[in-house]
Image (cartoon, rainbow, N blue to C red):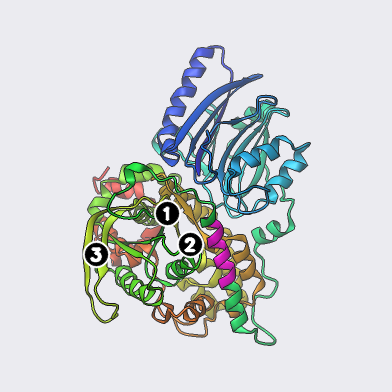
């Protein structure tokens, strides 16, 4: 995982002053950028014709046995690659090799633009990229078809063009936008003339891979169940196998290059942490991970709570933890309780607003704040003395637990693919299977804008990387190819028909109690939204009347004399 940035500006008559402007702008970005890649960082400025190009890159190395610099530049062509991603397939590289190095070698051997488009189109895995082709003087940039890694874009008269993983609202003279999923190219010789056009953005280049095109469109040819009932056992087996492969790919190439300052001599270090609510998605991920990683490796389950340990998610996490220990007794499961208050979150507001930007609503702040605190990797390791679900017997065995994991697994995408939200049930009542299919398509296709960029910026702020198996290409393809009623049946009650395929997977694995758990979003299940609504609006009822979730957070905090 990396932080990447490119700044392009025209030469001025006062060239030293222009260089100074570049350095000042880099200083504005690099503080956030460097935290994304704590292993090493680099920046450089080159002059091409009438333009300055400033490249910046920070590195969190998780792949390859040899240490590498974030600086990937070809001496012969002058080409430069800034890569933030993981290649799970599509390039020929071994476990010992770093995927960014292999990708760069592939790109500089491309004969034309069609080869470059083909190279990015066949990559399977999450990525964002900035690639400068020194031969053609063209900048390529973009995000994978789902937009799973953050990438922002700004154009302005003073700063020219800025493309970056993360920015800062307080230092922005013009608004940044999320780069839509896709691949884009810019001719350096002519691009600055467009910076004077408000709202200008380059045209997306079509993918050269039919599968990726189909998945990006996410159009279901049959939006309702009809015909012979599919064999449910076959479907469950197929999905479990696909999920297992998705988790395996996200674990197998990991080099455990933990920060020694984050390790403890008391506990065996862990490579992986799961943000854990005890719900259907996170518990299924934990069970599948158990089947994937070596038996001797501990798996951390981080549970965040804003209700003194009494939130629905904490109660669910404790119960699911007991169930996991019952089914898989030979695994060391670590339940880490992260107990916070809204006041503690509020002390982080300036920093969180910076990292969240351009995501800026009340909902963004609540979700982002909860994720930031949970993924920080600090809390209390709690353990139970009995596996009886009716007995509450958890005790703290380490109140200052610090995780060494640099990879954070999330259950994102499961609700959008398999019908887990309450609005899906509303749409089904209003418009039947066709309406539900349309709603799911809308949700899947806007994940990049509503979730992925924001949450990538939040978790990467700790020098960690998020990994999201439910939006693996093969999982998405499975969901798109299946009859909708095999995935979700909203004729059935809440906690039964929503995400019914995932509930059946849990039942198959013996996790029956968890399979019946109701969906609660992080901000509600942790009770963060309740605490925030009380602080900002007086009560949840008042917040709901004002439709607080979509309102801009900064004016609300300012009105509370918090800014």
Is residue 51 shown to the viewer in this render? no
Q: Which residues are magenta?
A: 240-250
Residue under numbered circle 1 = 271
Q: Is residue 273 rendered to the left or right of residue 179? A: left
Q: Secondary structure at mark 1?
A: loop
Point out residue 440 in the picture as x, y percentages from the top left corner: 57, 68
- Position of residue 308 relative to residue 124, above or below, is below
Circle 3 residues within 10 Å: few <14, some 14–19, many ≥20: some
Instruction: State the CA–CA distance, disc 3 to disc 1.
Output: 29 Å
- Position of residue 315 relative to residue 510, above or below, is above
Q: What residue appears at the point 59 percent right and 66 percent down from the top-left corner?
A: 475
- Position of residue 407 relative to residue 244, above or below, is above
Q: Nearer the viewer, residue 119 or 530?
A: 119
Point out residue 503 in the picture as x, y percentages from the top left corner: 48, 78
Q: What residue appears at the point 45 percent right and 80 percent down from the top-left corner?
A: 510
Q: Are marks 3 and 1 in contact (CB under 8 Å)?
A: no
Q: Is residue 242 magenta?
A: yes
The earlier-in-sequence mark between 2 and 3 is 2
Residue under numbered circle 2 = 293
Instruction: State the CA–CA distance, disc 2 to disc 1.
Output: 10 Å
Give me the disc on residue 383.
none
Q: Nearer the viewer, mark 3 or mark 1?
A: 1
Q: Secondary structure at mark 3?
A: loop
Picture quadrant of residue 388: bottom left
Point out residue 303 in the picture as x, y percentages from the top left corner: 33, 62
Give me the disc on residue 307.
3
The earlier-in-sequence mark between 2 and 1 is 1
């Amino acid at each position: 995982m990396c932080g990447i940035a490119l700044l392009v500006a025209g030469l001025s008559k006062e060239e030293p002053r222009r260089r100074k402007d570049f350095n000042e702008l880099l200083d504005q970005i690099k503080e956030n950028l460097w935290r994304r890649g704590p292993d090493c960082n680099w920046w450089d400025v080159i002059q091409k014709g009438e333009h300055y190009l400033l490249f910046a890159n920070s590195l969190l190395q998780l792949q390859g046995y040899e240490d590498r610099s974030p600086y990937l530049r070809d001496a012969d062509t002058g080409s430069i690659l800034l890569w933030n991603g993981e290649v799970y397939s599509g390039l020929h590289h071994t476990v010992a090799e770093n995927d960014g190095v292999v990708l760069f070698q592939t790109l500089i051997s491309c004969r034309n633009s069609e080869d470059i488009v083909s190279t990015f189109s066949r990559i399977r895995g999450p990525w964002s990229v900035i690639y400068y082709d020194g031969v053609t003087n063209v900048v390529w940039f973009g995000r994978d078809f789902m937009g799973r890694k953050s990438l922002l874009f700004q154009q302005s008269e003073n700063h020219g063009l800025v493309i970056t993983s993360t920015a800062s609202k307080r230092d922005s003279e013009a608004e940044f936008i999320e780069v839509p999923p896709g691949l884009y190219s810019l001719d350096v010789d002519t691009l600055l003339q467009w910076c004077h056009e408000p709202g200008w953005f380059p045209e997306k280049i079509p993918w050269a891979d039919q599968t990726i095109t189909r998945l990006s469109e996410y159009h279901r040819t049959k939006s309702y169940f009809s015909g012979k009932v599919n064999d449910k056992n076959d479907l469950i087996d197929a999905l479990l196998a696909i999920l297992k492969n998705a988790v395996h790919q996200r674990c197998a190439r990991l080099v455990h290059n933990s920060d020694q300052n984050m390790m403890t001599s008391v506990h065996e270090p862990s490579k992986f942490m799961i943000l854990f609510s005890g719900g259907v998605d996170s518990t299924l991920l934990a069970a599948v991970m158990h089947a994937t990683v070596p038996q001797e490796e501990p798996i951390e389950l981080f549970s965040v709570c804003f209700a003194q340990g009494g939130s629905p998610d904490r109660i669910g996490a404790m119960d699911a933890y007991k169930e996991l220990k019952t089914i898989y007794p030979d695994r060391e499961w670590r339940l880490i309780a992260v107990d916070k208050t809204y006041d503690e979150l509020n002390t982080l507001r300036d920093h969180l607003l910076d990292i969240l930007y351009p995501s800026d609503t009340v909902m963004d702040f609540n979700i982002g704040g909860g994720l930031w605190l949970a993924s920080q990797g600090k809390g209390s390791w709690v353990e139970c003395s009995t596996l009886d679900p009716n007995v509450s017997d958890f005790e703290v065995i380490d109140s200052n637990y610090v995780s060494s994991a640099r990879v954070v697994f999330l259950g994102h995408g499961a609700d959008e693919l398999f019908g887990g939200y309450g609005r899906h049930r509303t749409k089904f009542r209003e418009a039947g299977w066709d309406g539900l299919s349309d709603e799911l398509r809308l949700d899947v296709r806007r994940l990049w804008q509503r979730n992925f960029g924001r949450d990538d910026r939040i978790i990467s702020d700790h020098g960690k990387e998020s990994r999201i198996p439910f939006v693996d290409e093969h999982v998405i393809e499975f969901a798109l190819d299946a009859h909708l009623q095999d995935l979700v049946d909203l004729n059935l009650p809440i906690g039964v028909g929503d995400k019914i395929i995932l509930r059946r997977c849990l039942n198959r694995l013996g996790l029956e109690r968890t399979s019946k758990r109701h969906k609660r979003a992080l901000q509600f299940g942790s009770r963060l939204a309740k605490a925030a609504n009380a602080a900002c609006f007086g009560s949840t009822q008042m917040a709901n009347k004002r439709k607080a979730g979509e309102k801009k957070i900064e004016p609300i905090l300012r009105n509370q004399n918090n800014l």
